[in-house]
Amino acid sequence: MSNNERPFDLLNKAVGQKVLVRLKSNMNIRGRMASFDAHMNIVLEEAEELDGGDTKAKLGTILLRGGNIIFISPA
Amino acid sequence: MSNNERPFDLLNKAVGQKVLVRLKSNMNIRGRMASFDAHMNIVLEEAEELDGGDTKAKLGTILLRGGNIIFISPA
Amino acid sequence: MSNNERPFDLLNKAVGQKVLVRLKSNMNIRGRMASFDAHMNIVLEEAEELDGGDTKAKLGTILLRGGNIIFISPA
Amino acid sequence: MSNNERPFDLLNKAVGQKVLVRLKSNMNIRGRMASFDAHMNIVLEEAEELDGGDTKAKLGTILLRGGNIIFISPA
Amino acid sequence: MSNNERPFDLLNKAVGQKVLVRLKSNMNIRGRMASFDAHMNIVLEEAEELDGGDTKAKLGTILLRGGNIIFISPA
Amino acid sequence: MSNNERPFDLLNKAVGQKVLVRLKSNMNIRGRMASFDAHMNIVLEEAEELDGGDTKAKLGTILLRGGNIIFISPA
Amino acid sequence: MSNNERPFDLLNKAVGQKVLVRLKSNMNIRGRMASFDAHMNIVLEEAEELDGGDTKAKLGTILLRGGNIIFISPA
């Protein structure tokens, strides 16, 4: 692979930042990423479940299993 | 990865504490986390299945397979 | 991980005891756990499929594949 | 793990015997187990697909992939 | 494991023979098995998709991924 | 395994040829196979999504993940 | 395998280019591929969720898990 950037570099830069996470179950969760590992398990702080652009539920700090994730985006 | 925190640190701190677990089957379970392993299998004591904020069923002590988990949150 | 208890300790203590098993297919099975392995495959004796609290079908001795399990609880 | 019995011992004893297999697709198959391997792949002889207690279809000898199995029971 | 027969022996004997394959998607395919590998990937020649006992579609030679298979039966 | 042919030999012979691919999502895709790997990931050129025998959409060159494939057939 | 091209060569050539990604959840996403890894995890910049040929939602930069992908196509 000829480029030096790797997908997980995006996660590294996002630590401490707000991210939006789309899950397979069609949930959207927004929160500040505190940490991640090689399985894409992530800890989000001040996490909120979203309904469109609005907050549907406050989840606090959560450990999200990587296997449920479709994509992660810096919010 | 540049930060020293890892997602499983959250589980380590939560041992002996109440946690809320969201499952793929859309179940919500609350209980006191007694132990966990690298597959995110966890033992919950005084576990309850929730329906909204209410107790739907008392489950006692359960061993929950990690593969069913969407997220775990200190309750 | 700072605690010495591990989730599979619960299975070890449950050998010879009645357990309740919730499956992904939404089945509930109760039986006496005769053995288990690292994949959470378990053998249940005098196993019964439950419908609410009642016996729906007597299954006898069964080998249950771990991958189907949501949780196991000492009954 | 403190007991000496292992779940696959049940399969070992069932070779040459009639077993009932419940599949994830909700099929029930009965047949005489000729062999098995570590993935729980099994060969059944004189296999029948069941509908309740009745024979729905005669399948002859089949190689069943372990990943489809919920449980196996000596019939 | 005390018996000398193994499930894949059935595949070995079936090379060059007609087999019936039931897939998770509920398709039934019949064809002459030309080869297989350890993942249960198989090549079928003169393969036909069946609808009940009738030919629904002629598929020619196909490479079928093992992960889709429920069972394989000498036809 | 007693025969010398292996399922992936079919892919090797199909490089540069038209193939038909049936996906788990029930899509049928036809295209010229440019390359493949051990996970059955394949590159198809001039790929078309089919609806019955007709072209439903032109997809151009695509990299198809092997895990989605039910079968591949030389077209 | 007799050809020298490999499926991931397509990804290598697509770095910095627009790609279209079809997901298992039936989403279509278009964006400029910034990086990828061996699991087919990819980073897309200026990513858009498509509805037919139109933009349904602007997603910005996203890290997409490879396991959700059906195919990737240079757009």
Image (spheres, coloured by chain):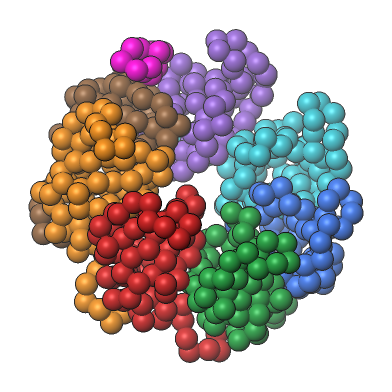
Chain colours: A green, B red, C orange, D brown, E purple, F cyan, G blue
Query: Which residue is at a point 61% across and 76% down the rendered structure image?
Result: A31
Residue G24 is a magenta residue: no
What is the magenta segment's predominant secondary structure?
strand
Determine which quarter of the picture holds residue F52: top right
Residue F12 percent location from the top left of the image:
65, 44
Residue F58 percent location from the top left of the image:
86, 43
- Between residues E33 and C2, which one lies in front from this camera angle? C2
Query: Which residue is at a point 66% across and 80% down the rendered structure image?
Result: A18
Determine which quarter of the picture holds residue B34: bottom left
Residue C3 percent location from the top left of the image:
25, 78
Quadrant, the C terminus of chain D: top left
Q: Seen from this angle, which residue lies furthest top?
A: E54
Residue D43 percent location from the top left of the image:
32, 29
Residue E26, visible in the rendered structure? yes
- Between residues D34 and C62, which one lies in front from this camera angle? C62
Relative to residue G24, is residue E21 drawn left or right? left
Query: Which residue is at a point 19% across and 64% down the rendered structure image?
Result: C9
Relative to residue C19, is residue B25 drawn left or right? right
